[in-house]
Image (tube, grey):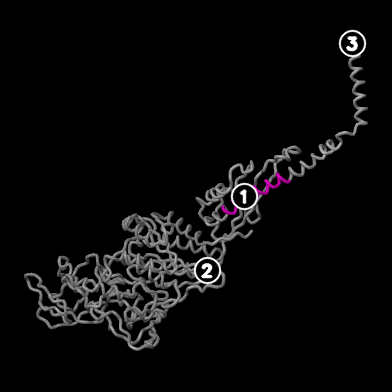
Amino acid sequence: MSNISIWATQIINFKDFFKRLRHDNRGASALLIGFSLIPIIGVFGFATDLTRAYIVKSRLGDALDAAALAGGRSLFEKDVHEKIIQKYFKANIKDKLMGATVSAIVELDKDEKVLVSGHIHEADESTLRVKATAEVPTLLMSIFTDTPITVESYTEVVREDVQLDIILAIDMSGSMGYPLGGSGSTGPLKVKIARDAAKNLVNILFGSNAVNPLLKIGLVPWSGSVNITDNGTKYGFAANGTTVLNDNSLLTVTTLTDGEATNPYLEANYTYDGRYYKYTRVWNNEGHKKYAHRGFEQKFSGGTPEPVNVLQNYRAKFSDVFYAHNAPSVPLLAEPLKGWKGCVYARYAKENAWAFSGSDEKADDAIAESNAADMEKGSIRKNGKHWVGWYPMNDEETEIQGKHCKLNLLRNPEIHSNKIKFNPKNLKEYWPNKPTKGYRIKHDNGEDCVPCLNQGITKMQHKKSTIISAIDGLTHTVGATNIPQGLVWSWRAITSGAPFNQASVPVANRKVNSVIILLTDGKNEARVGDAYNSAVDKNRDQRSKDVAQRIKDDNVIIYTIQFANNSGVLQTLLEEIATSQKHYFSAPDKATLQKVFTKIANDLSALRISR
């Protein structure tokens, strides 16, 4: 058969097939179902792929929220800000989730334009905007199209104003007046570096606001003691430091309502009040003899007894307290002398007379510990004793002349006898009209008195310029390091009740966060004329930890900063003082200190998702 015949036969057969098919209705429903499956599959595929895309978008939003919150807290840490955003974003979304290709997270400006990488946020910025996209490949919809579904997510976080009380407790001891490399090196002083870093924190927290009614910041400069006056003004002078006030305006005297109170101090062991000192033997050419340290009279060779100031206390019983015009909120247990700079002693002392040597020196420490109120916030009663105020440290206790201070010179010479010398030249610096023989001088041996700082406590307030100005005023660096006093006066300044009462009052559904940020460049030191007056000597580290625990128990957060000091002992102490290890920071140099204050500021900035 030819090829044509074969093709003709096949055509005839096809005609017969279609003719039979036209008249055969068996299986019509199957055919209809087959054709109807196409739109059904399309609808089901669209819904399935759309659900997958929605899941990706939801996960994308969650990851974006986490990244934005973390990035908001690091908004001003330019070296790590972008890395933190990327880290949190990647950690919260799985790679190739649903097969999607996720774009990198980007930051946006207020007009929602993409910011270039490395953008630096200014201190007055309060909003972070981020965006990310993902392309989700289709599965069932791929029958109709290969185009993936694009999803996008946007998050905006705003630093929310919360009730926040902060005390900056800045160490102003003598070493803070040196450059980072020490007294012989060059460069900015440590106190200036600390000032700049602290102001950066203030600028971040206030942002562009000159006043923030939900933010209070105060300043407590401290060294061996703390100046508790307003603006650091001297007693007897007006606020500008020049006009002498009338006597009537210096003091407010308040009589205790419950009658005479008994204070755990006795008269023999605290500060100057013009008592006399008694020497029972005199100087001779063979060397000095032992001199009695009890009594109230001084005797020198060939002369008559004459009075000199001696380490003494004010009266142990009292019925009045005094409020000086330059420290109107702090009750004083004695009238300060004119010119009082504003420092007070810690409420801690021995009950017995001051012990000068041997076992007597520690004889009544247990009594002192049980009666001490140096770790209390305000007026208290302990064991029948009333602690209603503090004793002022007058000029005689804090004044340094040359390389010596008066208090150091007047300590009993039987202590550290190997460091006692007679030097008529030095004697004339202090008592120019006195005979040279018979006086006993102890040369400077590292136990200098601690002068009172010029700057007093700046109470917590809402105004940015006030705290910036107070920080700029941190220039007088002098004295030793007394961490427990820096802590306890910060605690008194940040909590409600006497002697200060600037703490924020909680309102409905709003928590008050109280924070102390303590910076120091040195370890605890004991000095004769500091706030403890040697009553607490070797155990000052323990005193620091004890008072820190009291503060933390009072729901106050403590940050500690170890500045320009690599001491392991100091690190251990500051770690224990801090609320937790993450609240402790080491800042060996200027750049690190700036980062530390910036990080703390970011930690304190509460964030909320606004959109």
What residue sits 52% from the left and 61% below the top?
605
Q: Which residue is mark 2?
A: 511
Q: Nearer the viewer, residue 417 or 17?
A: 17
* Residue type of the residue flagged with mark 2: Lys
Q: Position of residue 275 (x, y in %)?
A: 22, 82
The alpha-carbon separation of the residues under discs 2 and 3 comes to: 103 Å
The disc, 2 or 3, on the residue closer to the chain's N-terminal end is 3
In magenta, the rendered stretch is: 47-66
Q: Which residue is mark 3?
A: 1
The reply to whether callout 2 and callout 1 are in contact (CB within 8 Å) is no
- Could you say which quadrant of the image residue 517 lies in? bottom left
Q: Nearer the viewer, residue 438 or 160?
A: 160
The alpha-carbon separation of the residues under discs 2 and 1 comes to: 31 Å
Indicate which label's residue lies in the foreground, 1 or 3: 3
Q: Position of residue 181 (x, y in %)?
A: 34, 55
Q: Secondary structure at mark 1?
A: helix
The disc, 2 or 1, on the residue closer to the chain's N-terminal end is 1
Q: Which residue is mark 1?
A: 59
Q: Quadrant of the N terminus?
A: top right
Q: Is residue 371 above or below residue 80?
A: below
Q: Secondary structure at mark 3?
A: loop
Q: Position of residue 388 (x, y in %)?
A: 36, 81
Of helix, strand and loop, which mostly describes the magenta segment?
Answer: helix
